[in-house]
Image (cartoon, grey):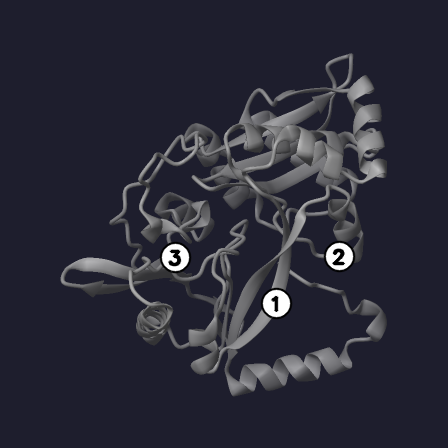
Amino acid sequence: MTTVRDRAPRDGVLPAAPAGAAPARAAHSLFHEPWWLDIATQGNWALATVRHNHEVIGEMPYTLTRKHLWRVSHLPPLTRTLGPVIPAVTGSASRQTRHRLDVTGQLIDQLPHCDSFFQVLDPRIGDALAFALRGFTVSARYTFRIGAQASAEEAWTRLDSKTRNVIRSASRELTIAPVATPREFLSFYEANLAARSRTNAYGAGVMRQLVNAFVERGAGTLLGAYTDGARLVAAIGLVWDQQAMYYLLSTRVQDAHCGSISLLLWNGILRALEHKLTFDFDGFSSPATFSFLNGFGATLTQRLGIERLSTFYLLTRTLKRRLTPASEVVFVPTL
């Protein structure tokens, strides 16, 4: 597959977007950046593009891989959302809707034939009508977000009392500071996985490259929670683009203070608000994670999932699910 690199990467984007930033990039996130996709897919991605009079009026990245018998196009590791990026047009609401449907339809026509296609759309995309009209299944997924215009005082007030208490308690025992190097963070992450007899779900190699890249490009940071003895007990990875900061990674030792991750997230929220960025908790995959994140008082925000399956793939998946014991079925409201 040919990788498209016709857009210059935007590095060091922590400050808010400059005045006059094109609304055409409204749904273009960090995860759409060519350098991010190059690493996350190991170069195995392409870009559907629609042009009018030599001007790009729509684009949508995708990947295509083979898993066993199947050709699949799913989200790459650590890539939370993708979907189309379509510049806004002036005119009536009906004209804007027609334009969006037409351009999205042309993008869909360029997507590869595969057994399973799935993406989660950026939360700024309010509908997936064009996909539904083309036979895709559209589902609701969720994340939590704190708006860029909130003040630190407002954000603190919105915290659940239990969350405030664990943050206060952790702050008395721990100091928050940047992790010195990506290598230190990665070694800490892998050691914590090993202590729990787990393997890296993202792929250690891809994760290492992405962490090094977003730190080097000024598109992310690694924060650590340290004891008075300068022992690292918890850490998180945050990444950002010109509109949002995303909670991407976290890890902690098993005996870390119960509020260590909460304290780290609170520090991330403060950094995001300082730079007028939305803080995105980046979804949840279990009731326990939902309960934890809900304590931060953020706004529950919908992200749309789009999926299209071949008949044989759908039949195989349905049969597999029917044969899976109910006790092994996991509630997955989002990716």
Residue under the image location 54 percent in, 53 percent down: 80
Determine whether label 3 and label 2 are within 8 Å by CB.
no
Determine whether label 2 and label 1 are within 8 Å by CB.
no
Q: Amino acid at mark 1?
A: Ala
Q: Mark 3 sits on what residue?
A: 44
User: The N terminus is located in which quarter?
Assistant: bottom left
Q: Mark 1 sits on what residue?
A: 140
Q: Which mark is residue 286?
A: 2
Q: Position of residue 287 (x, y in %)?
A: 79, 57
Q: Could you tell whether 161 is left or right of 201 in the image?
A: right
Q: Badge 2 local density, few (<14 within 10 Å), some, or many (20+)?
A: some
One can see residue 1 in this view: no
Q: CA distance from mark 3 to mark 2?
A: 30 Å
Q: Amino acid at mark 3?
A: Asn
How many numbered marks have been drawn onto this rendered protein structure? 3
One can see residue 212 in this view: yes
- The earlier-in-sequence mark between 1 and 3 is 3
Q: Amino acid at mark 2?
A: Ser
